[in-house]
Image: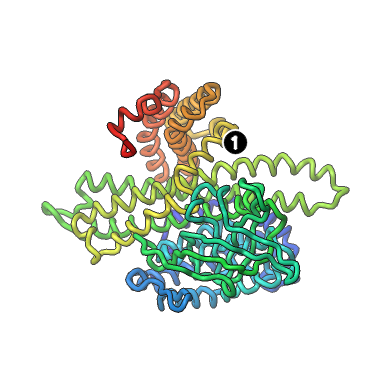
Amino acid sequence: MPNFFDDNEDLQFHFQHLPFGEIVPLRERDFAERELYPYAPENVADAVDSYARVLSMLGQLAAEFIAPRAPAVDEQGPLLQDGEVIYAPDTQEALKMLSQAGVMGFTLPRKYGGLNFPTVVYSMAIELVSRADASLMTLFGLQDIAETINEFASEELKEKYLPRFSAGEVTGAMVLTEPDAGSDLQAVRTTATEDPAHGCWRLNGVKRFITNGGADVLLVLARSEPGTTDARGLSLFLCEAQEGVRVRRLENKLGLHGSPTCELQFENAPAQLIGQRRRGLTRYVFSLLNGARVAIAAQALGIAEAAYEEALRFAEKREQFGKAIRNIPPVAEMLVNMRLEIEAGRSLLYETAWAVDMARELAHKMKDLPAEAREEKRRLRPQVTRFQRLASVLTPLAKYYLTEMCVRVANDALQVHGGSGYMKDYPVERLYRDARITTIYEGTSQLQIVAIIAGLLGGALRERLQEFATASYPAELEEWAKTLHRAQEQLLAAVEYVREKHEPDYTDLHARGLADAACDVYLGYLLLREAQRSERKALLARKFISIRGPQIEINTCRACSDDRLVLDYLDLLLGHSLAE
C-alpha cells in the first residue's frame, strides 16, 4: 500500500536522526503525565514510537485517500450558500477521516484532547498532507490558531474551545488582512469596542484574503484603543462565525481551489479578548505568524515533493530520441537539482522546527520553576535566549527558502513534462498553480528577507554558523568544508560592511542577495553534516556546495560593491512613469 511517510527515504532519514533525546523530555515535562493518560509515553523511545505510528497512519491516509481525490477537490472547490461556506464533498470526507484519526489537535495538551506532539513532528504531518492536497493543508495545517489560544487565552476560553479543535468539531482562521492593510498590519482599521453590559467586545470592519475564512473560530486583529494609529492600539480577539459575521465573497483564485479564501464583514460581532490589550500585534500575532510560517514552509515542501515525483515518473516513462528522457543530460540535471533543493529544504525545515521546539520548551521549563529555583533559572536563561534568537531568524529563512524553492521545483517539474505539463491531464499543472501562493501568504518573500537581514545584522546566525565552522569533518569532506568556511567568512564580512555603512536604502537593495547567501551557507553546512551519515548525502552536499559557492561570492561581493545604480537612476532605468 502506498504511504507518503514510509515510502519517503529522505523523510525517514530525518526522522531517524532528529534529536528527540533533547526535545521529548522537555515536551513531556520529564514524562509527568504517564500516569494520568494511558497513551502518554513512558520514555523517549515510547514517544518516538508513537510519533512514527501516527505519521505512518497519516502517510497512508494521505497517499491512499486524500491524494487521489485532490483533482476533484481542485475542480469542485468550496461554495458560498446563504452566507455559509460549504467545502467540496471530498474535503468534507477528508476532514472527517482526519478527525476520526485524532490528529486535529497535534500539538495541543492532552488535557484538551490533543496529542501533545512537538512542532518538528507536526511539520512532518503537514508535509504529508500537503503532498497529497495542498489546499487541505490550510484546514489541517494551521493548528497554530488553536495553539495561540492555548498559549495566550484565559483558562475559560481554552476549556471551551480547545477540546472542540482536538475533536475536529471546529476549524480556525487568522483574520488579519484588510483591503488597505496587507503586509502593513499596523494599518488595521477594524475596530473593537468594549460592551460591558454583555461581557464582550464588538467588532466592526472588513477583512480580506482570509484563508479558510468560513471557519468556525476566528482570531481577529482589531483596533481596541480609539485614536491610535500604530501597533500599540491593536488587540487580538476570538470570534465565533455566527452573529454579526458575514462572508461577503469567495475569492476566485489561481490555485488552492479546495481552500476557501474569503472577504469577511463584521457588524457588531461579539468577541472575547485574547490575553492583554495592546499586545495583539506585537506579541500574539507575531507568535501566530511565526507558527504559520513554519507550517507554510512545510506545505511548500510537500508541494515540491509531489511535483518532483510527478516529474520523475513522467521522465522515466516518456521516451524521446530512443531513450527515456530521464537519461537525457539536461533533463537528468534538472531532476537532480530538484531533488537537491528539496532535500536541502527538508534539512532547513526540520532544523528550524527543532529550534522552535527547543526555544518554546526551555522557556516553559524556566517559567514552571518555583521562585526559589534561582540557580536553575540562571542556568536556563542563556539557553532560552540562544534558541529564541536562532528560531527567530531560522523561521523567516525557512519560509523564504522553501517557498521560493517550491515555485522553482514546480516550474521545472512542469518543464520536464513539456507540452503535456501545460494540460490539465497531468497533476503537475495543479501543483504549479498551488505552489505560487506560498511565497505570498503569511508574509511575502520580501517580508521574510527583511526579517532575515535583521537577524543577520543582529548576529542571530553567527553563533550557529561558527559552531558548524569549528566542527570536525572527515578527510573526504575537508575540501568542501573549507569552501563553506570561506563562504561563511564572505557572508559575515558582507553583513559587517552593510552594518557599518548604515544606509537603510542600500541595505534593502542588497538584502535579497545577502538572504540568499545566508540560506546557501546554512544549507551547505546542514548537508555537510548529513554527508557524514550517507554516501548519497555526501554526493548531494558536494554538488550543492560546488553550485552555490560561486553564487555566495557573487552575492556577497555585490553587497560590498557600493552599487547604487537602481537607487540613483530608477526613473531613467524604468524609462518612463505612468504618473506622467
The residue nearer to you, when weighing 447 against 407, is: 447
- The image shows residue 77 at horizontal and vertical percentages of 38, 71
**Quadrant in the picture for the N terminus:** bottom left
In the figure, residue 3 lies in which quadrant?
bottom left
Q: Residue at x 42, y 21 (%)?
A: 562
Q: Quadrant of residue 565?
A: top left
Indicate the position of residue 135 as horizontal and vertical percent values.
42, 65
Would you name the residue on which mark 1 appears? 460
Give the residue drawn at x 66%, y 47%: 232
Q: Residue at x 86, y 49 (%)?
A: 371
Residue 454 percent location from the top left of the image: 56, 36
Q: Is residue 81 above or below residue 356?
A: below
Q: Determine the residue located farthest toward the left in the rendered image.
A: 321
Q: In screen coordinates, is 324 left or right of 113?
A: left
Q: Is residue 23 visible?
A: no
**What coloring was used for the rendering?**
rainbow
Vertically, is 556 above or below 51? above
Closest to the observer: 406 or 176?
Answer: 176
Quarter of the C terminus within the rendering: top left
**Picture layout, residue 295 above or below residue 62:** above
Of 222 and 23, which appears nearest the observer? 222
